[in-house]
Image: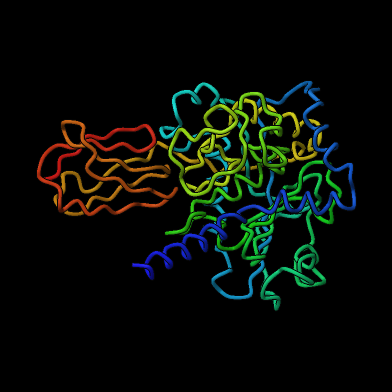
Amino acid sequence: MKIVILLLLSLGNFFFSIQAQTCGFDEKIATLAKKDPNIYSRFEQLFRNKNTPNHRQEIVIPIVVHILWNHESQNISDETVHEQIKILNRDFNNQGDLSIIPKEFRPYIATKKIQFCLANTNPKGLPSSGIERKSTKIEIFTGIYENALYSSSRGGFDAWDESRFLNIWVANINPDILGQATFPGESHTFDGAVIHSDAFGTHENTNSGLGRTLVHEVGHYFGLPHIWGMDNGCEFDDGIEDTPNQETHHFFCPRHPSISCGSPDMFMNFMDYVNDECMVFFTQGQMDHMINVIHNQRSGLLDFACKEIVKVDDNENYLSPNPTHDLLIVHSKLIGEIQIFNSIGQLVMNKYKPVGQDTHLDISRLQGGIYFMWLDGWVILSRFA
């Protein structure tokens, strides 16, 4: 028994240490502050500037994705890139699985939206897919190779015009960090977001496998701090009025309510550290702040016109075969938890569904009858023979 307990404790500490480094934003800001003590005041200034004249009703952000790979598994496919853009458009429009949001937080769900597209021309005006890739001899972009990521001559990729494009680098970076991003006005050698190859797009059986690392990092890029603020403790805050004061981060998928600073924590917010499946929304205050930053600090992004916006189309949802007796295929571009209920309302099966993928369910153990299925707000009546 002692051996089992020790092993469990060791495994617990191992997984906790990995999850504790999901984002390098705070660490990077603290490092920069050693050279530039005014960096915190510049960040706070973002919340003081509320001048938002002539807001455009439609905001579309052009993206270029720089893919660097040393092993073939890191050579992210175009399909995965398009899938990740769909995830951005879904989550910055709050179209994910909102059913897991507690009732007291639902009035704060953002209704405004930000959309994204892959750039269709490069900075010289030539046609582009918005994706560039190359192999590199650098196995991991960390230590002496960290800044090489942003330099074509050193094995990485130069940024496109940072005032007109959101640059995203995808590479094998420090394994303790899934991603990091720059905030507006930061003094930096690059501007944009960096995502670990293992956290870009969707992957099975990982805490960061639903593409929400980039959602989190783009939140930083548009001026959002973590939901607990720039440091731990109830004396700090994130500067957003409709997010509750929160002492620190959360990991994995906590049970609501988790109380700190005298109120329930909004750990299911995109700016916490929970698993991808448990972070699902921005508040209206956060969205207003991001839109304000776009119009004031990142207005050059609005000068680019996209030919096509990759959206999640929720009009292609169906089951096959229906009725069935052993295998049920869920066809949908939505994302969320598939829940199957029997005729008296009991939950008999659930499974998380990645965006844009068909999901196969083995329902052979269910008795014949009529069942209801729920996925992100749509319900289908199905009879399993």
From the top left corner, tell me how far across and down residue 67 is, in percent: 65, 63
Locate residue 323: give its quadrant.
Answer: top left
Count of labels in the image: 0
* 202, 14: nearer the viewer: 14
From the top left corner, tell me how far across and down residue 99 is, in percent: 41, 32
Residue 380 versus residue 172 in the image, above or below: above
**Farthest front residue in view:** 2
Horizontal side of 364 relative to 113 (left or right) equals: left
Residue 353 in sight from this viewpoint: yes
Residue at figure coordinates x 55%, y 24% from the top left: 108
Locate residue 42: give its quadrant.
Answer: top right
Please state, as top left, top right, bottom left or bottom right, where the N terminus lies in the image. bottom left
Residue 124 in sight from this viewpoint: no
Horizontal side of 128 relative to 52 (left or right) equals: left
* 252, 101: nearer the viewer: 252
Locate residue 319: give its quadrant.
Answer: top left
From the top left corner, tell me how far across and down residue 354 is, in percent: 42, 50
Horizontal side of 296 relative to 133 (left or right) equals: right
* 9, 60: nearer the viewer: 9
**Farthest bottom residue in view:** 137
Residue at figure coordinates x 81%, y 31% from the top left: 296
From the top left corner, tell me how far across and down residue 208 is, in percent: 52, 54
Residue at figure coordinates x 72%, y 68% from the top left: 142
Residue at figure coordinates x 42%, y 42% from the top left: 334
Instruction: Give the color scheme: rainbow, by chain, secondary structure or one colour.
Output: rainbow
